Image (cartoon, helix red, strand yellow):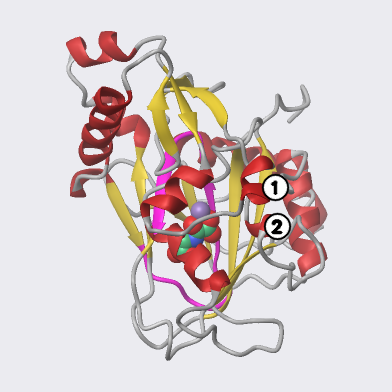
Amino acid sequence: MTACLAMNLAFRGLHPCFAAEVSPVKLARLDDPGVLAQIHAGMDRYAVLVFRDQEFSGAEQIQFAKRLDGEIHAKTGAAAITKNRFGDEALTDISNVDENGEIFRSNDRRRMYSLGNRLWHTDASFQDPPGRYSMLFSIVVPPVEADTEFADMRAAYDALSIEMKSRLEGLRAHHSIAYSRQILGFEFSEKEQEILKGAVHPLIRTIPRSGRKSLYLASHASTIIDWPVPEARLLLRELTEHATQQQFVYRHSWRVGDLVIWDNRATMHRGRPFDDSKYRRELRRVTTLDVPRAAHA
Ligand code: OGA
Ligand code: MN
C-alpha cells in the first residue's frame, strides 16, 4: 500500500531569507517525479537545501543530479591542473588529499588552486553555460569547524536602492578563473590560460519559475563590459561587500552524509578556513549545466 501514499517533504528554514533542511528522504534511488518536483519547488524558494544522512556512490550521485536537473557540467574545476581522483570530470573533488589519501603538502599546487574556494564565488561562472545546481556530498569531516558559507543574492538584490538597481540593469560582467586565482597569487601557465578564457554574464539575473532577480557576482568577476576596469572592480567589490553582510549569510556545519544543494544563480558561497595541514576534509561535488530544462522538469 505504501506505493499509493504520496510522499510530502517538509522544509525547515535555517535562516530568515533562505536555506532549509529537508525532512528525511533517501536521494540515491529517488526517482518519483512528484518528490523531485517538491525539491525543485524547495530550491526555488530556499536556494540552499540540506539533506542529512545520505549514501551515494559517485555514479549514484551523478545519476541523482541528472534525474533532478538534467545535464551535468564537466568543466567546473581543476581539470586543467590536476588529474581527477575519481576518474570522471563529472565528479569534482573538493578535498585536501591526493590520490593516495595523503593530505596535500602546504606548497602543493593542487592545494593552492583549491584555496580559491575560500573566496566568495558561484560555481563555473567563468564558463558558458555556467553551473546551475551544485550538489556537494560530505564523506570525511574534520573534528574542527570547516564550514561553508552561503549568501542569498536575491535578498541582497532586493535590498539595493532603486537607484542602484536601475544603474545595474543591463550590465554584463566578464568572469575568469585566471583572474580569481591570480588574486591569491596563483598563476596559470599560458597553455592553461588558453583553455580558460572566461565568459560574460549579466550582473542581474532573473531566475526562471520563481521570477526573482539576483545579483550574479563571484570572485571570478573581473570587469564590467565597456567600463573602465578600476571603476568596474570598485563596483563589483562594493556589491560583494553588500551581498555578503551577515544578514544575507547562512553558515553550514558539515556532518558526514550531508548532501547540500545550492542554486548558483541565486547564491554565492565560500569555504571557511581550518587547519587543512592537520585534518582531512573530503567532499565530492556534482554540478548541473545552466541550460534550459526539459519542459516537464
Ligand atoms: C564547492 C566549494 C567550498 C567548501 O564545492 O564548490 O566551493 O567549503 N566548496 O568546500
Ligand atoms: Mn564552489
> What residue lies at 74% left-to-right and 73% top-to-bottom?
85
Up the image or down, 232 lies above or below 21; here it is above
Identified by mark 1, the residue type is Lys
The magenta stretch is 252-270
Number of other residues with Cα within 10 Å of mark 1, as a class: few under 14, some 14 to 19, many 20 or more: many
| Disc 1/disc 2 C-alpha distance (Å) | 7 Å
| Residue 72 in picture, x, y percent from top left | 75, 45
Where is the C terminus found, in terms of image quarters?
A: top right
Q: Say the numbered circle drawn on residue 22.
A: none
In terms of image quadrants, where is residue 164?
top left
Up the image or down, 287 lies above or below 155; here it is below
Disc 1: which residue: 75
| Residue 170 in picture, x, y percent from top left | 41, 9
Q: Is residue 140 magenta?
A: no
> What residue lies at 79% left-to-right and 50% top-to-bottom?
31
Identified by mark 2, the residue type is Ala
User: Which residue is nearer to you in this view: 130 or 141?
Assistant: 130
Disc 2: which residue: 79
Residue 173 relative to residue 25: left or right: left
Up the image or down, 156 lies above or below 96; here it is above
